[in-house]
Image (spheres, helix red, strand yellow):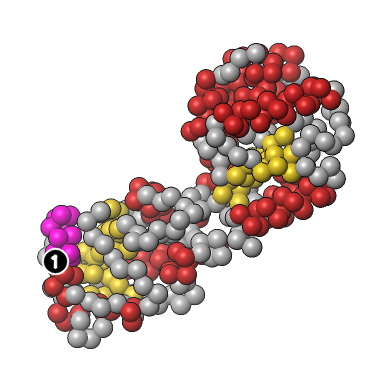
Amino acid sequence: MVNTGIIIGHFEPLHLGQIRSILDAAGQAKSLHIIITKHPSPHPDFTITLQDKARWLQMACAELPFIQIHTTNEIALPLHESFDEVSIDITASNAKLQRIIGELSLPTDTVLFVAENHSLAQDGTREQLLMNVITTPLQPEFDSYAIARDPIAHWSAIHPQARGDYTKTVAIVGGESSGKTTLVHKLANYYGASFVLEMGRLYVGTDLGGSEIGLQYSDYGPIALNHAQAIRKAAANATAPVTIIDTDFVTTQAFCEEYEGRTHPFVSACVDEFRLDHTIMLDNNTPWVADGMRSLGNPDARGRFEQRLLDIFSRHNIQPHLIDKPDYDARYQQAVTFIDQHIYGK
C-alpha cells in the first residue's frame, strides 16, 4: 500500500474499464488523484468539456472519499490505438509528472498508476522516470480507442454517469391527433429508450382538473419548465443512445400563440436554451380522434396550427424532419429509419 497515487487520462467517454482500473489503483493507495486531460481528437458528434468529465468522475466516485478529481489544460496525452505506437520522451514525461506533483502539492513519493501494457511501464522506460510506476490489470474487453471512436456502438461500456452526454434527444411533434404519443411509446419500446411524456397534457391533468378550460397565459412557463426538467432527467438516466421526447417547447409556444394570441418569452428562451438534437414532425393528415381534451379538430384549425409550428421552427432556426405518410405503421417505419441513420449510423 502506497500513500499517494495518480492516474492521468482523457476519460472521453468514461467507461467501465477505466473505472475498474481506478478501483484497482484505489485499492493500492491511501489517496488517489485522477487528472483529467483534454482529448486531442474529440468526437465530432458530441461536445464534451473538461467539466463534463469531471462531473462524471465526481459522481461515480462520490462515495469514495479517498479519490480526488482534477482537470488540466496543460497536459496533452497522445491519441493512439496501441501503446506500441507511442514513442516516449522521458524528459518531457518527467517534466509533466513533476509539474503535476508541484501543482497539486503531492508528496515526492507519489506513484503513477498505468495499465500493465502502457509504454511507461515497460522495462527500460520506467527506470528512467522520476516517479515510481505501479501497473493495473488489463481490461481487454474495453478498448478505449474503439469506445472513443464510436461511443454509440459501445453504449453498454459507457459508464452510466456519462451516458446522458452521449444520448441524442429526438422530439416527436405535430398537431393534435397526429399520432405523436403512440409513436413515442413504439419508438421507446423499439430502442429500449428513456422517454418524456407530453408535458402540456400532464399539466392539464394534474393542475387544471383534466380540462383546458382553465388554461391561461401564466401556465405556459411552468409547463415549459416541467418539460425541461423531465428531459434533463430522462437524458441523465438514458437507457439507449436515443431519448424520445413527446412534443417540444415549440409546440408549447404554438399553443400559447394559438390560445393567447401572444408569444411567451420564457417558452421562447427554452426553445433556444434547451436545444433538442433532432425533431421529427408528423404531418396532420391522419383521422381526427376526439379524446375529451383535444381541440382544433376541424381541417382549417389543424392546418393553421401546423403552419404555426413551422413558422416557430423557422423563427428559431430549427429544421424538423417531416414524416408525411398518412398510415400509422408507415410513419413508425419512417421514424425508425431516420433514427437508425442519424443516431445509430446505419
Residue located at (40% from left, 58% from top): 42
Residue located at (20% from left, 80% from top): 126
Label 1, on which residue? 95
Q: Secondary structure at mark 1?
A: helix
Residue located at (86% from left, 31% from top): 288
Say which of 258 and 197 sits in front: 258
Residue 144 appears left or right of 26: right
Say which of 43 and 236 sits in front: 43
The percent coordinates of residue 334 (x first, y second) are 74, 51
Residue 172's place in the image compared with 186, above or below, is above
Say which of 275 and 238 sits in front: 275
Residue 67 visible in this rendered orientation of the protein: no
Residue 304 appears left or right of 15: right
Quadrant containing the C terminus in the rendered view: bottom right
**What residue span does the magenta drawing correspond to?**
96-106
Residue located at (73% from left, 29% from top): 306
Residue 321's place in the image compared with 306, above or below, is below
Quadrant containing the N terminus in the rendered view: bottom left
The percent coordinates of residue 69 (x first, y second) are 30, 54
Question: Mark 1: which amino acid?
Answer: Ala
Magenta stretch mostly in which secondary structure? helix
Residue 222 appears left or right of 57: right
